[in-house]
Image (spheres, grey):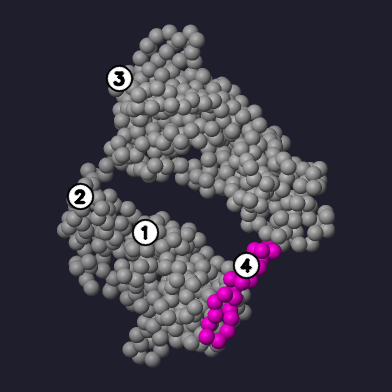
Amino acid sequence: MSSDLLSGSTASPDDYDASSIQILEDMEHVRLRPGMYIGGKDDRALHHMVAEIIDNSMDEAVAGHATWIEVELHENGHVSVRDNGRGIPTGPHPKDPEKSALEIIFCTLNAGGKFSGDSYETSGGLHGVGSSVVNALSDHLRVEVARNKELFAMEFSRGVPQGKLAKIGAAPNRRGTAVTFHPDANIFGSLTLKPARLFKMARSKAYLFSGVEIRWKTHQNDGETLQEAKFHFPGGLADYLSESLKGATTYAEAPFAGTVSFEKFKVPGKVEWAINWTPSRDGFIQSYCNTVPTPEGGTHEAGFWAAILKGVKAYGELVNNKKSSTITREDLTTGAGALVSCFIREPEFVGQTKDRLATVDAQRMIENSVRDHFDNWLAADTKSAGAILDFLVLRAEERLKRRQEKETSRKTATAKLRLPGKLTDCSSKTREGTELFIVEGDSAGGSAKMARDRKTQALLPLRGKILNVLGAASSKLGSNAEISDLTQALGVGLGSKFNVDDLRYDKIIIMTDADVDGAHIAALLMTFFFTQMRPMIDAGHLYLACPPLFRITQGAKRIYCIDEEEKDMWLEKGIGGKGRVDLSRFKGLGEMDAKDLKDTTMNPTTRKLIRVTIDDDEPGETDDLVERLMGKKPEMRYQYIQENARFVEELDV
């Protein structure tokens, strides 16, 4: 098919010039792409706005400048966060004397007092982003600052100042900052702040720092106080865990809990933790960095679990329990209630919403800080230590038993198989209608697990690029982990030992990202199947998935586009929806949610598949082509490019 037929755009390349480049002001960009700053426009993102303002006040408290924080949800949907800290600076900013420091903070991204470390040793706010993002996404925001016995106020709407910072009177007995805002319905639609969720948020902050009192208020529509509470927990996380496990039987009478500073590492900060095990509850861990929740964990969690695992195994060796060596982190987390909170300087998070901590040093410091204390705790309370060890050994035995049963649960027509641990198998007992998706990476595998049909669709994630089998020694093929997983999952041997009748699935589908790296991985896999399992291709069992590169959404209407040309065609033609057109580019399968992946790539009624076939006009032609393109001799690839370059049409980019 010619490129003229593929392209739906009639715009000339000359139309793309300097005037085509848009420069968005900070507030405009936040409103246009809120997902980049708070994760989206959903209920979680809405409440994340409140968390950002609370985190700013918590930073003042942790730094020793505030003793209380008040969170109030008003009857009109506004929310207020007040503290008795130092108050946001109100003087002219040195680099822009026409504006106050307060205006700069609320109207400029990457402006704040948390970069140098001089104002805050540790902080949880978005480092110059949180206040301005909340301001941009609110239809009304008011800031009051009591500083140097004077009261100042300034108001904004959708990030735009509604006047200059004004001095509104004396404040001899008041200090601190008060922020009142109302989320913009143009961004969040009909979503509203939920009292129960804000109540829980406020209470958890008090647990995380014993030196602060959190005050909570909310109102009914008639303006009367519906609920009022004060939270102050001197016991910190130990109190939090006791409340969380209230009524549950635990293996230790008192949790293993403590607080240690990072003084020996010559850096500011500390770690606090609490953990206990129970047979009556599912395991959970809640982790925090600088009072900010990290639901996806990170390096602080990794350091904590490493300390606990090493401590348990060391105690098992001490009491001569040989089975303790089989305990893994998976066994530790089963039935464990754990809380971990660290305070570190300049934390590095994955993404603006700070769901996962990425600071490398945190793992080492926390592991070393917790380990010694855990060893001493186990030695001092041998009754609890013995009960916990017995519980964990039992969990390990059950895990190994489940794994063994899973490895032999499905049969081929001739024999039972040992299946690779990374394989997520389907439930069907026969090959007919089953599919194995070979997925690029674990992140894509997560979405695929939710999108698949459990009865007929299995998943095998591969990490990185598979070995290029052309020219590799047979011993190298046999020892390669990815190839071993593939052959075990398929239930077949390699080369002359391959028997298509032993194949465990009807379709083998290569599902990689729609980019250059994805195409390379697909090429390596096809080379592997061509050289080692060619009868599978001849019998029509090998396919390529066709994940889209773009999604165009307009109202309830959505269209998926396989490439740039199809995207341009639909943008020009229109997709027939109502409202604003939203264009998303998928950088990889891991960025697609389960619905996108199911509709475009996994659902047999809506997906597109390419069947891999071998077209030999002359005997050995395909063998020769594969050798030239994938073999060890780069000069053959170079020669092929020279010979065929004239067939490549020039592309306008």
Mark 1–mark 2 Cα distance, whole angstroms, equals 21 Å
The image quarter in which residue 515 lies: bottom left
Mark 3–mark 2 Cα distance, whole angstroms, equals 36 Å
Q: Residue at label 1? A: 595
Pick the quarter of the image with the N terminus. bottom left
* Amino acid type of the residue tagged 4 in the rendering: Arg
Q: Residues within 10 Å of mark 2 (few under 14, many from 20)?
A: few
Mark 3, secondary structure of its residue: loop
* Amino acid type of the residue tagged 3 in the rendering: Gly
Q: Position of residue 611 (x, y in %)?
A: 36, 78
Q: Position of residue 587 (x, y in %)?
A: 39, 56
Span highlighted in magenta in the image = 396-417
Residue 48 visible? The answer is: yes
Instruction: Confirm or deny contact between disc 3 and disc 4 (CB under 8 A).
Output: no
Instruction: Confirm or deny contact between disc 3 and disc 1 (CB under 8 A).
Output: no
Mark 1, secondary structure of its residue: helix
Q: Residue at label 2? A: 578
Which of label 3 and label 1 is nearer to you? Answer: 1
Q: Residue at label 4? A: 402
Which of label 1 and label 4 is nearer to you? Answer: 4
Pick the quarter of the image with the C terminus. bottom left
Q: Residues within 10 Å of mark 4 (few under 14, many from 20)?
A: few
Instruction: Confirm or deny contact between disc 4 and disc 2 (CB under 8 A).
Output: no
Q: Counting residues from the N terminus, which is met first, the one under dot 3 or under dot 4?
A: 3
Q: Position of residue 487 (x, y in %)?
A: 54, 78
| Residue occupying image coordinates x 69% and y 39% | 257
Q: Counting residues from the N terminus, which is met first, the one under dot 1 or under dot 2?
A: 2
